[in-house]
Amino acid sequence: GKASERIGRRRPKEAAEILQVAENLFKSLDDARGEGEACAALAGVVDDDDRALEYLERYLQIAEAATAAANDDDALVARADASRRLGELRLKRGEFEEAAQLFRENFSISRQLLGRGEATTTQVEKARILLGVALGNAAKQRYLGALLDHDSAPLLAWKNSRTPLPAHN
C-alpha cells in the first residue's frame, strides 16, 4: 500500500493497477483490513474525485463492518481514518453537511481512541478543527442560500429565535 502510494505520486496509473489487484486479492482472501487499506490507497492515487469518493466510501463501509464485528482499536482507527479522509474529500467538493457528519464521527471516535491511549491530543484537536470548518461552511452555505433565494422568512426566524436555516445546495 505505502509503496504503491509512493509510486502513485510519480506514476499514478501503474499504482492504481497494482492497488486494484491488491484490493481484489484481499477481497478473495476475505481480508477486510487489507481490502480497506487498498481502497484507501486507491483513493489517494486516482485522478478522479468521483472514483476517489467511491473508494473512500467502500473503505468506510469496510471499517464500519470491522468495528461492528470486533470493537478493537485497529477497527476504530481505520473507521476514524476513513471518516476523516471521506470528510476531507466531501469538504473539498463543497458538500459541507455531509463533511460535517463525517467529521462529527471522526471527532467522536478520536476522543474514544484518546481515552484508550490510541490517539494523541493533536489528532483530536485536528478532528475538532475539521468539524468546526465543515460546520462553519455548512452554516455559511445555508445563510447565503437564504439570501440568494431572497427568502426573508427563514432569515427572520433564524434572527429572532435561532430556528435553523434550511439546507441549501
Image (cartoon, rainbow, N blue to C red):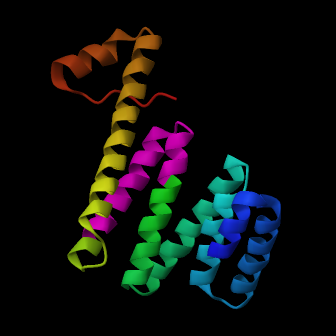
Q: Residue at x 64, y 78 (%)?
A: 35
Residue 97 is at least partly visible in this image: yes
Q: Residue at x 51, y 58 (%)?
A: 85
Q: Residue furthest left?
A: 161
Tell me which corner region of the image, top left, top right, bottom left or bottom right, holds residue 162: top left
Task: Give residue 149's position: percent from left, percent from top.
Answer: 47, 12
Q: Residue furthest bottom?
A: 29
Residue 96 is inside the magenta segment: yes
Task: Give residue 37's position: percent from left, percent from top.
Answer: 59, 75
Query: Where are the magenta residues, as a range?
Result: 87-112
Residue 94 is inside the magenta segment: yes
Task: Give residue 26's position: percent from left, percent from top.
Answer: 69, 85
Tell me which corner region of the image, top left, top right, bottom left or bottom right, holds residue 132: top left
Q: Residue at x 79, y 77 (%)?
A: 21
Instruction: Please determine whether, in this image, residue 39 is positioned above or below residue 166.
Output: below
Task: Give left or right: position of 59 versus 18.
Answer: left
Closer to the camera in the image, 4 or 25:
4
Closer to the camera in the image, 109 or 7:
7
Total count of labels: 0
Main secondary structure found in the magenta portion:
helix
Q: Residue at x 61, y 82 (%)?
A: 34
Residue 1 is at least partly visible in this image: no
